[in-house]
Image (cartoon, rainbow, N blue to C red):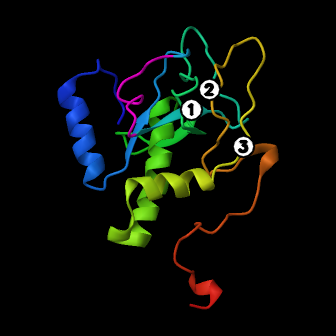
Amino acid sequence: MSFKMGRDEITDFALNIAYNAGISLVASAGNRGYDANHYPSTHPRVISVGASGNDYKPWPVTGGVGSNYGEGVIALWAPGKNVLLANKNGGATLTTGTSFAAGYVSGVLAIFYGAEGKAMNPGLALTRLMAQTDPWMTFPSGTDWKKAAAAFANTGNRKGAKLNPPRQYLGGPPTARQGC
């Protein structure tokens, strides 16, 4: 999900129905650059994703714009600054925002569901997602980050000084290279 709205009972009800039907819910944390109550990303069944740069720091506040943050506001961070996207003219463009970070996390969850099928559920998907995060986020001084989570999603989009080899999907089926 990539929108902000006021909390209401109908949306809460719909989110709970989707979650109980086995659907993992992911939402962007918002682009206001502060500790914010950004709904639906703060709904208890939604995985809220903040945007980071390639330097493993939160997408910074520039001119009042940046990734929202804070304890209970962000579950994890993913690439959200200068993300390369296809544009409507058939070319590519760089864009920035928490919406794109949420897309990375949704893609990781899609892999989990594709590999496990009906055995996967939102609770198990979140457990596996968080088990594969890296505690690499660094928070610049000068801002009270409100105990923001330091978890960085393992999206396969490693850049910078902290490169590492790809890891097998934890808990997933063995790969052909492992002799299955």
Please give the range of residues in magenta: 36-45
**Which residue is label 2 attached to?**
59
Q: Residues within 10 Å of mark 3 (few under 14, many from 20)?
A: few
The location of residue 152, given as percent across then percent down, is 64, 43
Q: Describe residue 81's horizontal placement relative to residue 166 as left or right.
A: left
User: Helix, strand, or loop for circle 3?
Assistant: loop
**Which residue is label 3 attached to?**
135
Of the two numbered discs 1 and 3 on the same chain, state the one appearing first in sequence: 1
Most distant residue in the bottom direction: 179
Residues at badges 1 and 3 in contact (C-beta under 8 Å)? no
Q: Closer to the observer: label 3 or label 2?
A: 3
Q: Residues within 10 Å of mark 2 (few under 14, many from 20)?
A: many
Disc assigned to residue 51: 1
Residue appearing at x 29%, y 17% in the figure: 6
**Please, what is the three-letter code of the amino acid marked with disc 1?**
Ala
Residue appearing at x 21%, y 38% in the figure: 14
Is 33 in front, or is 157?
33
Residues at badges 2 and 1 in contact (C-beta under 8 Å)? yes
Q: Describe residue 170's horizontal placement relative to residue 48 as left or right.
A: right
The location of residue 82, given as percent across then percent down, is 58, 34
Of the two numbered discs 3 and 2 on the same chain, state the one appearing first in sequence: 2
The location of residue 73, given as percent across then percent down, is 51, 27
In space, the residues marked 2 and 1 are separated at their CA atoms by: 5 Å
